[in-house]
Amino acid sequence: MLRHALKRTSTLVSGILAAAALTAFGAPAAHASTGGNYVALGDSYAAGAGVPGQSAGLCLRSDHNYGHLVAAALGSTSYTDVTCAAAKIKAMTSPQYDAFIRVNDPQLNAVGADTDLVTLGIGGNDLGVSDIGIGDIIATCIAGAVVNPFGTPCHDHYADGHWDFGSWSWQYGEDTLVDRIDAAAPQLADTLQRIHAKAPNAKVLLVGYPSVLPDNERDCLGRQPVTTGDVAYLRGILGKLNTMLATTAAANDATYVDTLTPTKGHDACSSDRWIEGALPGSPAVPFHPNATGERVMAKAVLAALGR
């Protein structure tokens, strides 16, 4: 039954993830021009997936993503945006495919010796195994909530939740998502080193993920189709992912940009959302930043640059 629910929900989520609507928000106030060549790399959070106006086909690239806003604020001499929805770390060095369709060239191709600034937002999709990356985790958690609305089906699925008759208690085993975060770290470190090798004079910023879920998981009751227990679990996974990103950045001469702190209180379960939920109230892919969220992320990047 769970397997069929997962399949149906995966199809639903894949359909939702392809949707976008039409509104626009303004850019941050411009600063004095710094000149320089800026390249934006990353996944759907960096691409601004679903935020108008969209381009680059299945890459769902917005002209109001944080990269565009930062470039405008800096007055960059040139700006190259190769971000792409569903990108995994391997998409930095290999072409990206979706159902056998080539959707993007290797993103590091855009980085060169004359590059002065690089922003990279990546890692979340490496937690998933399908072409939609983190989307298959969302599908699994939503499907689990359908058949076990009062439990922790998502946590149980990824961390081997089971009843132990020896201790007469519920136990967990090895956590698949934590293992995937650990496995992504050396790949990310290699990517950062490749960026430094291609652009030795560039400032490199590794942008973390925003506050998708609230500190109080009960805020999600009746607002999102995930159980309360799984909200707490997934919030912890997001925290581990951001910690890995910050640690890897520090070890590889990159600056980590914290976007979780400035977006707290405006998560997918908030009444004032900068991160949309399963059914977006403003144009954005589900569980991704809307135009306001991208603007706040842009301000975090500019603050990391001393702007």
Image (cartoon, helix red, strand yellow):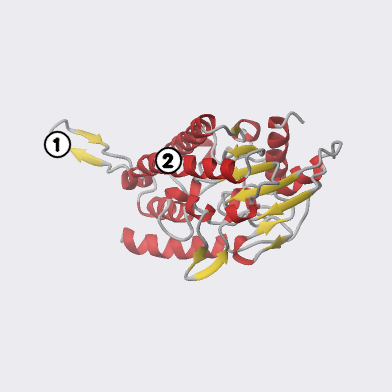
Answer left or right for 23 relative to 5: right
Instruction: Examine the image and state in which quarter residue 162 appears.
Output: top left
Residue 124 percent location from the top left of the image: 50, 46
User: Along the polypeptide, which appears first: circle 2 or circle 1?
Assistant: 1
Answer left or right for 90 relative to 17: left
Residue density around tag 1, few if under 14, some if 14–19, many if 20 or more, within 10 Å: few
Residue 157 percent location from the top left of the image: 32, 48
Q: Which residue is mark 2?
A: 186
Residue 22 percent location from the top left of the image: 74, 60
User: Would you say residue 268 is visible in this rendering?
Assistant: no
Query: Camera-side residue: 188 or 160?
Result: 188
Say which residue appears at 42% left-offset and 59% top-offset. 130
Judging from the image, what secondary structure is the residue with disc 2 in?
A: helix
Give the quadrant of the C terminus: top right
Judging from the image, what secondary structure is the residue with disc 1 in?
A: loop
Residue 165 - label: 1
Q: Amino acid at mark 1?
A: Phe
Query: Camera-side residue: 57 or 252?
Result: 252
Instruction: Examine the image and state in which quarter residue 121 appears.
Output: top right
Residue 110 percent location from the top left of the image: 64, 54
Query: Camera-side residue: 51 or 257?
Result: 257
User: Would you say residue 12 is visible in this rendering?
Assistant: yes
Say which residue appears at 47% left-offset and 34% top-offset. 244
Answer left or right for 148 relative to 83: left
Give the quadrant of the N terminus: bottom left
Answer left or right for 196 relative to 77: left
Frontmost of labels 2 and 1 is 2
* In the image, residue 15 above or below residue 202: below
Measured in 3D between alpha carbons, the distance from the residue under mark 2 to the one under mark 1, in whole angstroms, is 38 Å
Which residue lies most toward the left here?
Answer: 166
Say which residue appears at 72% left-offset and 31% top-offset. 303
Count of numbered marks: 2
